[in-house]
Amino acid sequence: MKTVQLSQVPEAFFNITRIGEMAIITMYDNVKTQTEGEELSYSADQYQIKVPWRDGLENLDFNTWLTRVKELESPSTTVERRVARDVLI
């Protein structure tokens, strides 16, 4: 996870970018409004995961994927550490 600064609230809390046979899923959580004088901006926690492309990814359940990517950020087993190494960006 990294905290990112945004000029506007994301239209969707996730987006999918296809790169060849892979997909990069970018998810936003904990979006907060920030004001600096007259300027309005936003910050959010950003998570990214790389998975094989498949039809129907756009119908993914955001909460399930977000929960899984958060679990992989703090892997508790060797298997989770290996998966996290391969899929987290």
Image (cartoon, rainbow, N blue to C red):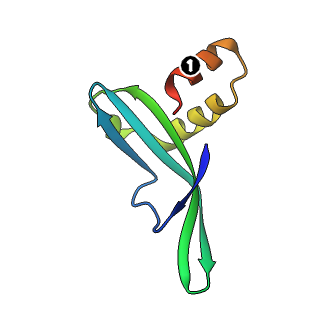
Image quadrant assignment for residue 47: top right
| Number of other residues with Cα within 10 Å of mark 1, as a class: few under 14, some 14 to 19, many 20 or more | few
Residue 64 is situated, as x and y percent measured from the top left of the image, at: 53, 37
Indicate left or right for 6 with 32 as reference. Answer: left
* Residue sitting farthest toward the right: 76
| Residue drawn where x is 54% and y is 77% of the image | 40
Q: Position of residue 61 (x, y in %)?
A: 45, 40
Q: Secondary structure at mark 1?
A: helix
Residue at mark 1: 83
Residue 39 image offset from top left, x and y in percent = 54, 81
Determine the residue positioned at 44% across, 60% down: 10
> Which residue reaches farthest bottom?
38
In the rendered image, the vertical position of residue 85 relative to residue 8, given as above or below: above
Q: Quarter of the image holding residue 73?
A: top right
| Horizontal arrangement in the rendering, residue 53 relative to residue 14 (left or right) | left
Residue at 68% over, 24% down: 75
**Which of the 4 quarters of the picture holds residue 77?**
top right
**Which residue is nearer to you in this view: 46 or 38?**
38
Q: Position of residue 85 (x, y in %)?
A: 57, 22
Image quarter in which the N terminus is found: top right
Q: Is residue 35 above or below residue 11?
A: below
| Residue drawn at point x = 51 percent, y = 21 percent | 86
- Does 56 sit left or right of 88 as displayed? left
Say what amino acid the circle numbered 1 marks: Val
The one of 87 and 11 positioned closer to us in this rendering: 87
Count of numbered badges drawn on the protein? 1
